[in-house]
Image: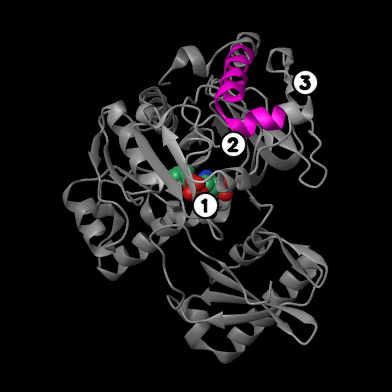
Amino acid sequence: MWEKQYESMDRNDLEQLQLERLQATLNRAYRSVRFYKALFDEAGIIPEEIKTMEDLAHIPFTRKTALRDNYPYGMFAVPLREVVRIHSSSGTSGKPTVVGYTKNDLAHWSNLVARILVSAGVTSEDVIQIAFGYGLFTGGFGLHYGAERLGASVIPVSSGNTEKQVMIMKDYKTTVLVCTPSYALYIAEVLEQMGIHPNELSLKIGCFGAETWSESIRGKIEEILYIKARDNYGLSEIIGPGVAGECQYKCGMHINEDHFIPEIINPETGERLPIGEKGELVLSTLTKEALPMIRYRTGDITRLTEEPCQCGRTLMRMDRVTGRTDDMLIIRGVNVFPSQIEHVLLEEEGAEPHYQLIVDREGALDILEVRLEVCDKIFYDEVKLQQEFQKRVQKKISSVLGIKVKLTLIEPKSLERTAGKSKRVIDKREK
Ligand code: DLL
C-alpha cells in the first residue's frame, strides 16, 4: 500500500476523520463560495450542525450545472493567486466546466493517484507509458504526477499516433500502459497490424479508466496484450483520476474515503440508498481547497460494498460503473442502457469488442440499430453462418431489452477507433 496508515484505517477512526474534514470543508465552502452560502441558507443548513453522516443527507445536491452557471471561477473557494493548476472538461453540451487546484490539492492528487497505481500492482521499478491526452483533460497530467510521485519511470507520450506508441512500447520496454480501455484495444490492433507479437513487449499491467468498460472487454484486453488490466475511476469535478482504483483481487475499486465521502442515491427521488444497492454515486470532497464539492451528483451508476477485502485495505469499494444516468436511452418508452447491449454482444464468439448504437426515428417510432463488428470468419466466409449469427444475436438483444432491435454486422475494423473516450451511441432523434 502507498499510504497504509490511511488505506487500512480502522473504520471508526476513518469516520471520525471524515467528519472532522467534512466540517472544515462545509465551513470553508459556506464562507468562501457564494453558491454554497445561498444553497445552505435556502435549505436552512448551518454547517456546524452537520455532525453525522446522517446529517449530510440533509444537504441539497450540487450538480454539473452549478459549475456551468458559475463559469469559469465562481465555484472556487480560494483567490485565483492560490490556484496553481487549471483543468477543464469539455462535456457534451453548454459551457465547459473549469476546475482548479492549489499546491496542497496537487500534492494530494499525486498521492491518491500513486495509491491507485500501487493497488494495481505498479512499483517504482516500472516504466509507465501514459497514453492519456495531456492538456485540459485530467487523465494525462493526473496519472503523470502520480506515477512520478511513486518513483516509476514515466513516458509522457500522450494519446494518438498509435504506431509511434507501439514503437515506444517495444523499444523503451514499457511495463505499464495507462489509457482508456478502448484505446488499449486499438493499440492491440495496431500491434497486430505491425506484426509485433505481445511476447516481444515487456508489458505487464494496464491501468485503464475514464470510460465504462465491462468484464468481457477486460478479458479481451488481457488476452490480446498479455497483461493484467485494472480499472480506476475519477472525474474532473472531484479531482480527476485518483478517486478509486482496483486492487489485485478485482472485486471493485477502493474509494479513497479519507478524501471523498461516497453515497448512493436513487437518481429519480434523490433518496439515499443503503450500502449494497445500485444507484447514482454522489461524492463530497474532504480535503480539496480550491474546489470543494459537496454532495456532487456524478451521474455514474454503481454499487458500494463494505465487505472486507483480502488486500487489507479497509476503504469501501465501488463496483465497475455500468453506465451514466444520462446515457440511458428511452426507446419506445423502454429504458435501455448501452451496457446491457454490450453484455449480450460480447458473450458471442465472433463478436469484436467494437460496436455502435444508432437511435433514430421513423415517423413516430424510435428505432435502435446495433452495428457490430464481427471477425473475418463470420463476415467473409459463409453467408449462411453470417445470417444465423445475425438472427440469433438480434433475437437475444431484443429479448433482453424487451424491444425490437435491428442488428447489422459490419466488417472488422470499420468503426472509427479512438485514442480517448469512445463514443458508442449516436442519437439522431431531435431533442
Ligand atoms: O475521465 C478522469 C479520469 C482520467 C479517470 C483517467 C480515470 C482515468 P472526466 O473527463 O471528467 O474525468 O470524466 C469523468 O468519466 O463521471 C464517468 O462517467 C467516466 N469514468 C471515469 N472513470 C471511469 C471508469 C476523467 N473507471 C467521467 N469506469 C465519470 C467507468 C468512468 N466510467
Task: Give the residue at mark 3.
Answer: 54
Q: Quadrant of the N terminus?
A: top left
In this rendering, would 236 be left or right of 342? left
Q: CA distance from mark 2 to mark 1?
A: 15 Å
Q: Position of residue 420 (x, y in %)?
A: 41, 57
**Mark number for residue 351?**
none
The region drawn magenta spans: 19-40
36 within the magenta span? yes
Q: Is mark 1 within 8 Å of ligand 1?
A: yes
Return the residue at label 1: 211
Q: Amino acid at mark 3?
A: Glu
| Mark 2 vs mark 3, CA separation in Å | 25 Å
Residue occupied by mark 2: 252
Q: Is residue 370 above or below residue 41?
A: below
- Give the dominant element type of the magenta stretch: helix, strand or loop: helix
Q: Amino acid at mark 1?
A: Glu
Nearer to us in this view, 235 or 68? 68
Q: Nearer the viewer, residue 353 or 257?
A: 257
Q: Does 185 lie within the magenta span?
A: no
Residue 250 in the image: x percent, y percent? 54, 37
Q: Is residue 120 or residue 71 the one in the foreground? A: 71
Quadrant occupied by the C terminus: bottom right
- Earlier residue among tags 2 and 1: 1
Whether residue 308 is situated above or below residue 212 in the rendered picture: above
Residue at the image point whose x is 48% and y is 35% from the top = 239
| Cα distance between the residues tagged 3 and 1 | 31 Å
Element on which disc 1 rests: loop
Looking at the image, the residue that sits furthest to the bottom is 383
144 with respect to 404 (left or right): left
On screen, residue 253 versus residue 42, left or right, reads: left
Whether residue 230 is visible, yes or no, is: no
